[in-house]
Image: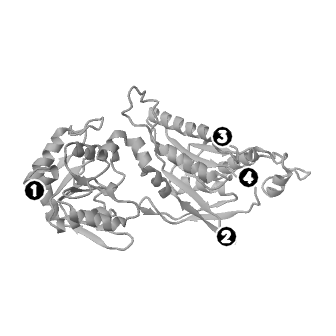
Amino acid sequence: MDHHILVLAISDFYDVKENRYFFNERMDGREHDFSCSAVGQMEVIPQFIEGCKETTITKMILMETALVKKTLKDEPLLRLRAADLFPKDENGIDIKAPSAVDFFKYRMGMLLKRSNPVYESIDVDECSPETGFEELLNAIRREYRECAAEKGDWKLWLDIHGAFREISMTMLSLMQMLTASLPEELPDADLDDVLRAIPIDGVYSTLFQRGRNEHRILDRTSFYRIFTESPLVQYMNYGQHLLEALQPQAEPPFAFISYKRGVEDKKRFAFLGKLKKAGIRYWYDQGIEYGADWAKELERRNGQSDAMIVLACEKYFSPASYQCGKELRDALTQNKPVIFVSIDGFMPKETDHVWRDPETGETARVTKAQIEAIKKQNQIVLTEKDGSIDENYTVQDSVVNKLKVWMKAAGCSRIAGEG
């Protein structure tokens, strides 16, 4: 069973009129052009996910304050705000007198085309939302465990638009907790109950612009990536492997590690930790000090290196991964020895490869002949399938031995303290 979950906070009633919201930015490598109609901003993101993402929502987890659960009969002011929303009886009084939560569910039944979500309510205090935070976190974790047990498709979206005073802090805290997990190396741990990092597929908001007839849907997913790359989260996720991989060499000789962020991170840390134990000196961008010019420091360190180790993967050779292509091109231009260590089983095709900077239009090119020359050397595939790394992320000694053979043949053995 699929678990496609949307988390959002319900807003109170307000002065209502129909508005149109649109989204026409690039997502997932393709252009989207989406618009929808809504009388409340909470109605926008569910329609966007269903329409723009072309999927269904199986459950909505709703954060609800006490006010949004009050009915119109209880609150005359709410009745005035929502006067045009509901049919009236002969006395001009709404027949059902629903709450804001009831109205949201009613509207979803009208607006969603292919989804019929189940609703789960989480009570929050507007001034102290931490009162419902643990319940919210546990609800998401429960859904994730059930999805894994059922081998279903997992999707999680967050609507971070303001519905109560501290919604931004609540959602930021939620993202932080979902990206962190306890390391698998914990002794005597029941792995079924150990916390796992839970992936988030999208973080969205709306931008209401007064005086305009159309308003925007905003993709805020990039903020989520900040949490996935924080040092604390990396340690919680990768444990001892991260400690072993930290502190790259500050001074030559060293090999420059060129890699694509976000691909097989745990395997990368395990590999680098193994190199450090074996006395092989390397540098990668973890060694860049805060405040330094990132691009210039990468270029400088690449120039200082004796060789380059490319952690090859499919995304590394994607034309959009310009920084990767630039690093490889620069190393080859300087006639440095290069070796490919595949971390996902992928090796580049023996053809010309071109990367393009999406902002400046600059390109980096590596020729077919250069790729062929690298692959003729002692290339390494770091996968469980070939036995070079096991399920516990233990890198085998054979990997280090192959690297040392390559270093000796390439004339850069001093990286390993030899020659």
Element class at badge 1: helix
Q: Which residue is drawn at 61% across and 49% down?
A: 8
Q: Which residue lies furthest to the top in this view?
A: 188
**Residue position for label 2:** 213
| Residue 85 location (% of width, % of height) | 78, 55
* Res. 410 mark: 1
Q: Can residue 56 be seen in this view?
A: no
**194 vs 224: above or below:** above
* Kind of residue indicated by mark 2: Asn
* Kind of residue indicated by mark 3: Thr
* Kind of residue indicated by mark 4: Asp
| Residues packed near mark 3 inside 10 Å, few (<14), some (14 to 19) or many (20 plus) | some
Marks 3 and 4 close (CB-CB < 8 Å): no
* Res. 131 mark: 3
Nearer the viewer's eye, disc 2 or disc 3? 3
The CA distance from mark 2 to mark 3 is: 38 Å
Marks 2 and 3 close (CB-CB < 8 Å): no
Residue nearer the viewer, 217 or 359: 359
Chain-order first, disc 2 or disc 4? 4
**Residue position for label 4:** 12
Quarter of image, res 291:
bottom left
Chain-order first, disc 3 or disc 4? 4
The CA distance from mark 1 to mark 3 is: 61 Å
The CA distance from mark 3 to mark 4 is: 19 Å
| Residue 223 location (% of width, % of height) | 50, 56
**378 vs 59: above or below:** below
The CA distance from mark 2 to mark 4 is: 22 Å
* Kind of residue indicated by mark 1: Ala
Element class at badge 4: loop
